[in-house]
Image (spheres, grey):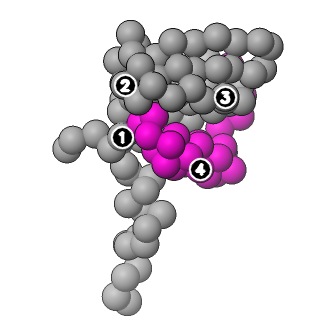
Amino acid sequence: MAGDGIVDGPEHTEAETRWVAPEKQELHWENWGKQHALYDARSGETHLLAEQTARVLQQLVACPGTAREVMEALCSESGECCDEQSLEHSARLLRQLHNVGLIEKADT
């Protein structure tokens, strides 16, 4: 049948999108427990981030990657279970970080 085994929707493209964060020296962090404040020197904006969002961004600062690569790195680091729900959550956080200008799609 036509289309069997082929994923051609936006989810497929989004899962393969490689993201990149600014250089470490452009981001200035402060944290208070599970809350993080981030000053982005490029834009002059300050962002308040939850723990998981900060972890995702810090992972991208260390190494550009896809939602799956970010999720796997964080799960490996923390010993958390990696499943489809974790992947969806990582993809959602990456979209949010992109929407506020903290990460960009990497050049392919």
Q: Are marks 1 and 3 in contact (CB under 8 Å)?
A: no
| Label 4 vs label 2, nearer the camera | 2
Query: How many neighbours does mark 3 have within 10 angstroms: few (below 14), some (14-19), or many (20 or more)?
Result: some
According to the image, label 2 marks what residue?
A: 42
According to the image, label 3 marks what residue?
A: 48
Range covered by the magenta-colored residues: 78-103
In percent of width and height, residue 85 lies at 69, 50
Sequence order check, earlier mark of 1 and 3:
3
Question: What quarter of the picture does the C terminus occupy?
Answer: top left
Q: Are marks 3 and 2 in contact (CB under 8 Å)?
A: no
According to the image, label 4 marks what residue?
A: 92
Sequence order check, earlier mark of 3 and 4:
3
Is 60 or 98 nearer to us in this picture? 98
Residue at the image position 68 percent from the left and 20 percent from the top: 36
Residue at the image position 50 percent from the left and 43 percent from the top: 100
Say what secondary structure mark 4 lies in: helix
Q: CA distance from mark 3 to mark 4?
A: 17 Å
Q: CA distance from mark 2 to mark 1?
A: 13 Å
Say what secondary structure mark 2 lies in: loop
In percent of width and height, residue 33 lies at 80, 13
Main SS class of the magenta portion in the image: helix
According to the image, label 1 marks what residue?
A: 104
Q: CA distance from mark 4 to mark 2?
A: 23 Å
In percent of width and height, residue 46 lies at 57, 26
